[in-house]
Amino acid sequence: MSLYTKLVSNILFPLHELVKKHDTTRIRKNLEKSQWSSLESLKQEQAQRLSAFISKVYQQVPYYKKVMDEKGVSSGDIQSPVDLNKLPFLTKALIRDNFEELRSASAGPLSRFNTGGSSGQPLIFLLGKERVSHDVAEKWRATRWWDVDIGDNEIVAWGSPIELGAQDKTRLMRDKLFRSELIPAFDMTEEKILAFIHKIRSSKPKMLFGYPSVFDLLAKTAEKHEIQLDNLGIKVAFVTSERLYPYQRENIQRVFGCPVANGYGGRDAGFIAHECPQGGMHLSFEDIVVEIIDEHGMPLPAGEKGEIVVTHLGTSEFPFIRYKTGDIATLSNKACLCGRNLPMLESIEGRSTDFVQAMDGTMMHGLALIYILRDLDWVAAFKIVQESLLLTRVEVVLTSGKLNKEQCTLIVSGFKKRLGESVDIEVKQLSEISPEKSGKYRYVISKVTG
């Protein structure tokens, strides 16, 4: 660690958080101790925090007092994660319909945030200093797993209008002080991509942070132009906010010459899990209770795939209790070689809308369709939209030339084999695939399974 990084990590950033009235530094230090605790100790601590959290929410949040009274559930009835099934699920629709009633009577200043809306209407919700402190601390702990700290050179590829709209003079000065540089993940023309690659080469960051789709695109463009990026000393590429596909991991690792660390979570649900250098996808167990449920809302054991439901224990001012994320994943019952006893996710398979349904009712992950296109070396980019059981649209960008009849037939044939011979496959060539409003790229969208 350089002297400057030590100054930022140990003095300047903690002072910055103190001024903002965030408890980030204390929380991070506690997290770095608790990660080595026994699993039994972690479970006991989580249960105690959950019980205190529910008690506080019942007393101060009108929506949950009403719901719990109607169900005849007292705060004392929730003593462990198993007891959470006594409470209803929280959905985006319920948050919209009960927005003011979800605000705690004792809440301090709250900030409005929203999700990117890539799967439909954006969700507006409120975050307080408590939640922000825990989220920043969780990310901070995870980056330190990879020997990267606040104050090390960092390139951030991000696309949220919230971040980009906040680039005022104060924030620019702060980012410069902490050596964090933002590249906006919008309007990714080849000219801008090459400019971003030049910026990465000149700044030689210790860490990349952002969307996997953006770094995959940067990697492919660098290879195309024979630009070397694996000699810059990058320690890790932290990717988040989108599903990380195996081919993206391979491309990023090969071109940038560094490992890829997956971070899973969202604005609404918080940082749910982070990948350690040994490959374990560790849950933010001290802060978030994770349930995996089946289509009927029943809990599933480790090893079985279902929807992720989260209860964030740092959200007493605007609670997220049994919040249905719409994401599909599997809990692991294995121990990680890194020695941390934080439980893990075995797999993260993306949103329910990343799954498609064949005419015969078979459900399959969008990867089944993605790999049809990934095997075609003349396809540079693509987007798949399942409009209905009878119609799927495929948008493609070619490496060169115009889409011919033979190429179109090859795509149609491959998709019909997966979805059914009676399904109409519309193939359209575009000059580029535009990102969602959030700046993210969605490769598969199903209006059938969503």
Image (cartoon, helix red, strand yellow):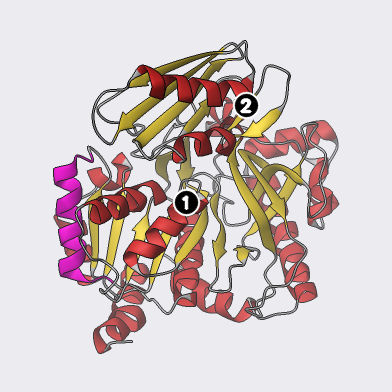
Q: Position of residue 389 (x, y in %)?
A: 61, 14
**Residue 21 shows in the view:** no
Q: What residue is shown with label 1?
A: 247
Q: Is residue 285 left or right of residue 293?
A: left
Q: Position of residue 32 (x, y in %)?
A: 56, 78
Q: Is residue 325 left or right of residue 15?
A: right
Q: What residue is shown with label 2?
A: 418
| Quarter of the rendering occupied by the N terminus | bottom left
Q: Is residue 425 above or below residue 181?
A: above
The Cα atoms of the two marked residues, 2 and 1, are separated by: 20 Å
Q: Is residue 353 left or right of residue 261?
A: right
Q: Residue at x 66, y 36 (%)?
A: 90
**Contact, mark 2 vs mark 1 (Cβ under 8 Å):** no
Amino acid under disc 1: Tyr
Q: What secondary structure characterizes most of the magenta part?
A: helix
Q: Does the magenta run of residues contain 196?
A: yes
Magenta-highlighted residues? 188-205
